[in-house]
Image (cartoon, grey):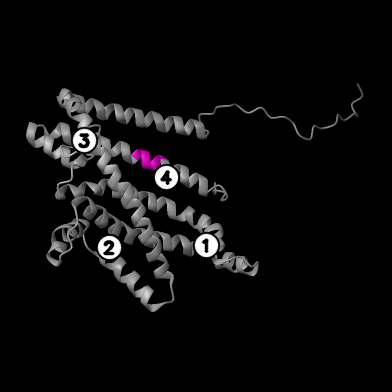
């Protein structure tokens, strides 16, 4: 074969990549899962060596999960905790949006009311707010049930924090986006919900998810009003059986599992609203 003959080069050679690499994303997730498994195994071993009464936990668990109704026929345990949290999430979100719009408004009245509300509820402890709504308002003829008082306190408190998160998300969207939309003749509603909101959600979701997880845990404060939610039952069963460790650890594990569920939902929302933004690698 003559030496001066040059074979044509292949422009797009087919590269066969391994389906799995320890150094790739799948390998990283596997290593993280192994770390979690090792830590969880160690934690369970520690609890097992404490000599806990697992029979008592199994006996009280259906009540703590809310599978049984309270003596007055109302939901209790985890079911009541989730009910309070979900309603408070919805109400706090509405309050936060209105407050954020007030903070962004050029109207002095709206701006003043929004800033005063946010300052007060962020500057006072949540427990004090719960007690004021439940114990102090009746002095002025405003009597609310423990259920309504807990929802109102959680909603107003977390609405103040969430308002700043929403305001930051709105401000993160370049002003040129809205100006270009107005130049195209789009209405304010379309601009708000179709252009600004989807871009702002990418900034809003991570801190908002943290706020909602904190709200789930802070719902335990409504136990001071006698509501039979998860924390109330854990303390009651601990006092009646003299097994505080079993009941409190069970409540902690349930709160943790509920928080993990919210974290997974938050991660899905982050991926959904972050699809149009390439992450820097």
Is 144 in front, or is 20?
144
Q: Which residue is mark 1?
A: 192
Q: Are marks 3 and 2 in contact (CB under 8 Å)?
A: no
Q: Which label sits in the foreground, 1 or 3?
A: 3
| Separation of marks 3 and 4 at Cα, in angstroms | 30 Å
Sequence-earlier tag: 3 or 4: 3
Q: Which label sits in the foreground, 1 or 2?
A: 1
User: What's drawn in magenta, residue-wise?
Assistant: 260-264
Label 1 Cα neighbours within 10 Å, binned few <14 / some 14-19 / many ≥20 = few
| Separation of marks 3 and 2 at Cα, in angstroms | 35 Å
Local SS, label 1: helix
The residue most toward the top is: 1
Local SS, label 2: helix
Relative to 199, is 67 above or below?
Answer: above
Q: Is residue 262 magenta?
A: yes
Q: Which residue is mark 3?
A: 69
Toward which corner of the image does residue 249 lie, by quadrant? top left
Sequence-earlier tag: 1 or 3: 3
The reply to whether residue 197 is visible in this rendering is yes
């Amino acid at each position: 074969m003559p030496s001066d003959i040059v074979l044509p080069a292949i422009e797009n050679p087919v590269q066969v990549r391994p389906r799995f690499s320890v150094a790739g994303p799948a390998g990283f997730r596997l290593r993280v899962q192994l770390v979690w498994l090792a830590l969880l195994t160690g934690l369970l071993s520690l609890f097992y060596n404490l000599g806990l009464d697992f029979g008592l936990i199994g006996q009280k668990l259906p009540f703590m999960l809310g599978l049984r109704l309270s003596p007055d026929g109302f939901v209790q345990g985890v079911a009541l905790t989730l009910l309070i949290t979900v309603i408070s999430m919805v109400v706090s979100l509405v309050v936060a949006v209105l407050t954020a719009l007030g903070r962004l408004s050029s109207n002095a009245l709206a701006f003043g009311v929004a800033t005063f509300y946010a300052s007060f509820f962020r500057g006072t402890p949540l427990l004090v707010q719960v007690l004021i709504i439940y114990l102090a308002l009746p002095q002025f003829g405003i009597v609310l049930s423990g259920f309504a008082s807990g929802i109102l306190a959680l909603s107003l408190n977390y609405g103040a924090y969430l308002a700043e998160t929403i305001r930051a998300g709105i401000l993160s969207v370049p002003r040129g986006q809205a100006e270009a939309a107005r130049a195209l003749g789009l209405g304010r509603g379309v601009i708000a919900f179709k252009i600004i909101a989807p871009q702002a959600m990418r900034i809003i979701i991570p801190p908002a998810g943290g706020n909602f997880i904190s709200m789930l845990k802070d719902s335990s404060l409504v136990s001071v009003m006698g509501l039979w939610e998860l924390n109330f039952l854990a303390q009651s069963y601990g006092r009646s059986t003299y097994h505080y460790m079993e009941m409190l650890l069970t409540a902690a594990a349930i709160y943790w599992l509920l928080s993990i569920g919210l974290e997974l939902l938050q991660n899905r929302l982050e991926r959904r609203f972050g699809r149009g933004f390439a992450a820097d690698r």
